[in-house]
Image (cartoon, rainbow, N blue to C red):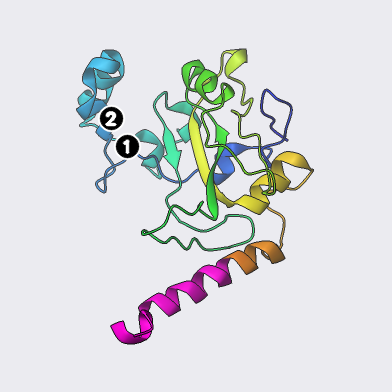
Amino acid sequence: MEKTPGGTSVGVDDPYEFAGLCDHLTGEGRCRYAFDHYEHDPEFARERAEDDYACPPANPESEATWADCPHFRSRKQDRECVRCGLAEKLNELTEERPLLEEHHLSYRDTLEKSANAAGDHEPIDSDEPTTDDGPAGNGADDGELSHEITIYLCRWCHAKVHNSWARITDDVAPDPAAVAALEERRGRELEETGFESAADRYGE
């Protein structure tokens, strides 16, 4: 399996198996990156402009893959754990730690790798599952393209993936502690949304 520089697993052999559509792809199959960020890569932008900004990997008749594109980026937006299916439950009025965490399968470049290797994450409580979500070693050091590919894992699966041989493809149910945390939040949400007079709430 792919590993972080710290030696922990990211839970997959091939990050591209979990990559969705490119974040820069428009609904018409065109490359928004080449249009909006010409100055970042003029040569790439000119090539796409000559083809009406069409995205080759998005064309079913093309043999190009996402791995071939120098600016491919896929950040999953579905707010549920890819491994166990646990859904997020946030309370916007509190600062509770999210049940889900972003898990990087690979990183865009060495600058982002350095930032994350330096600890670009919030501190983790000692009684919570811990992770080492450093960048995956996806071949960038061998001269291959490196892309940012992320998914969401619950805190418990995230820790298991990094701290054991757990795979993202494992057929598992949510950890009992994860279920308990979710149910606790649901219970509080029901209490807060239930009708209660001011007199009852404040004991008057």
Disc 2 packing (10 Å; few <14; some 14–19; many ≥20): many
Q: Quadrant of the C terminus?
A: bottom left
Q: For the point 39% across and 40% down, which residue is it?
A: 22
Residue labelled with disc 1: 24
Q: Residue furthest front?
A: 204
Residue 1 lies, with reference to residue 169, above or below; the image says above
| Residues marked 2 and 1 touching at CB (< 8 Å) | yes
Q: Is residue 59 visible?
A: yes
**Could you say whether the residue bearing mark 1 is in a helix, strand or loop?**
loop
Real-space Cα distance between discs 2 and 1? Answer: 6 Å
Q: Is residue 65 visible?
A: no
Amino acid found under the numbered disc labelled 1: His
Range covered by the magenta-colored residues: 182-204
Q: For the point 73% across and 35% down, which residue is it?
A: 1
Q: For the point 47% across and 27% down, which residue is it?
A: 68
Give the tally of numbered discs.
2
Disc 1 packing (10 Å; few <14; some 14–19; many ≥20): some
